[in-house]
Amino acid sequence: RIVYHLYIIFAQQRDELLEYCVNKGIEAKVHYPVPIYRQPALKYLGLKEGDFPITDAHTKKIITFPCDQHLSKEEMAYVVETVKDFYTN
């Protein structure tokens, strides 16, 4: 069963893709810019940037797209085509 909240992908050139999508009217965002292990609530653990290099790498590549029951198939197709256009142009 699908959860209608966010559709998250790993993207090369994430920041450029984000800007491209926003300029095309797509509500793309970076919802998780700081890994969990670097959140203020976990500061007491003494963890620092670089302690989890794979997590750090993933954090720099994730982008989220809207994904809810109110999006039409046409709107979803527009998101897909916009992302494809970014990588083919």
Image (tube, grey):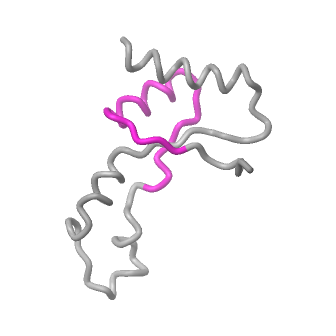
Decide if residue 46 is on the left or right side of residue 7: left
Q: How many marks?
A: 0
User: On the picture, is 48 further left or further right than 19?
Assistant: left
* Magenta-colored span: 8-32
The x and y percentages for residue 32 are 45, 56
Question: What residue is drawn where x is 26% and y is 84%?
Answer: 46
Q: Is residue 70 above or below residue 52?
A: above
Q: Quadrant of residue 69?
A: top right
Give the answer, above or below, for where 85 lies relative to 7. above
Which residue is situated farthest in the bottom direction here?
Answer: 44
- Is residue 10 shown in magenta? yes
Image quarter (top left, top right, bottom left or bottom right) of the C terminus: top left
Does the magenta-highlighted stretch encompass residue 14?
yes
Q: Is residue 44 left or right of residue 86?
A: left
* Quarter occupied by residue 49: bottom left
The x and y percentages for residue 38 are: 34, 71
Position in image of residue 76 (x %, y %): 66, 27
Residue 70 placement, left or right of 28: right
Please state the horizontal and vertical placement of residue 82, each as a whole percent of the image. Answer: 52, 20
Q: Residue at x 26, y 66 (%)?
A: 52
